[in-house]
Amino acid sequence: MNTLENIKTEILNCKKCSLYKERLKTVFGEGNPKAKIVLTGEAPGASEDKRGLPFCGAAGKILDELLESAGIKRKEVYITNILKCHPPGNRGPRKKEIKACAPYLDRQIEVIKPKTICTLGNYSTKYIFEKYGLKNEIQGISKIHGKVYPVKFKKVYALPSGIEQFKGVKIIPLYHPAAALHNPNLKELLKKDFLTLKEL
Ligand code: URA
Ligand code: SF4
């Protein structure tokens, strides 16, 4: 059965891409299993690799700040990543790693059934837009951040059950919180975009 517990167990033992060799811990995701909002980042960083929790390092601090500024409680939402293992040296995810790992994200989304999927940064935006029938809308994050894209499909082919639950689910792409680490202007933009998220 597709449950969060089952997916988590599979990930703990996963060797579907070479990232398993150097990971310290897999980072499954955390939060409310019935969340209305799923936020998805890119991949665990070094802190996440050590602790096994998503967004628990420097980027996580920014994310916490953004959630707080919008009045959203971290434990109300569900936070995860496209890749569940840390890429060495924090390099970007590779195509074949995304291909191997993203089905776990698809399944998490299928179980949680959020009303809104918030993609953090270019990698997760591209992945989710392609899967959810928004391929033609893909542009750099600087162009599309903070806009709301309703899913037009009835069915999402990524999802094993193909249930007709995704029409109207809202996708909102945002800058990756790490981008705001050394850029106060971006942080202000992100804060505004998080208010849009709160309104949804
Ligand atoms: N950056 C991400 O994309 N995800 C994390 O969990 C931490 C940093
Ligand atoms: Fe498996 Fe994903 Fe880790 Fe690769 S990154 S080993 S696919 S859990």
Image (tube, rainbow, N blue to C red):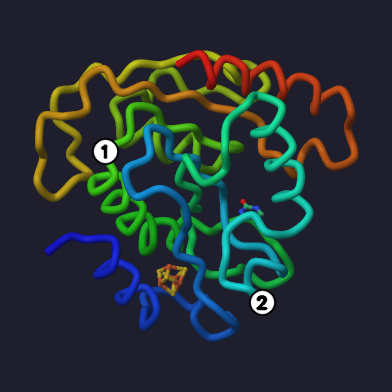
Task: Say which residue appears at 60% left-offset and 82% top-offset.
Answer: 24
Q: Position of residue 113 (x, y in %)?
A: 26, 38
190 on left or right of 167: right
Q: Which mark is residue 50?
A: 2
Q: Earlier in the sequence, mark 1 or mark 2?
A: 2
Task: Say which residue appears at 57% left-offset and 37% top-offset.
Answer: 73
Q: Position of residue 17 (x, y in %)?
A: 43, 74
The kind of secondary structure element at disc 2 is helix
- The residues bearing labels 1 and 2 have C-alpha atoms spaced at a distance of 29 Å
- Given residues 75 and 167, the one toward you in this image is 75
Q: Are marks 1 and 2 in contact (CB under 8 Å)?
A: no
Instruction: Check the picture and name the quadrant holding the C terminus.
Output: top left
Question: In the rendered view, would you say 181 is above or below 31?
Answer: above
Question: In the rendered view, would you say 159 is above or below 103?
Answer: above
Q: Position of residue 139 (x, y in %)?
A: 55, 22
Q: Position of residue 102 (x, y in %)?
A: 37, 55
Name the residue that disc number 1 marks.
Answer: 113
200 on left or right of 11: right
How many other residues sit within 10 Å of disc 1, few (<14), some (14-19) or many (≥20)? some
Q: Quadrant of residue 144?
A: top right
- Given residues 24 and 95, the one toward you in this image is 24
- Given residues 73 and 128, the one toward you in this image is 73
**Looking at numbered disc 2 in the image, what kind of residue is underneath it?**
Lys
The kind of secondary structure element at disc 1 is loop
Quadrant containing ligand 1 = bottom right
Question: In the rendered view, would you say 137 is above or below 132?
Answer: above
Task: Say which residue appears at 51% left-offset and 67% top-offset.
Answer: 27
**Looking at numbered disc 1 in the image, what kind of residue is underneath it?**
Lys
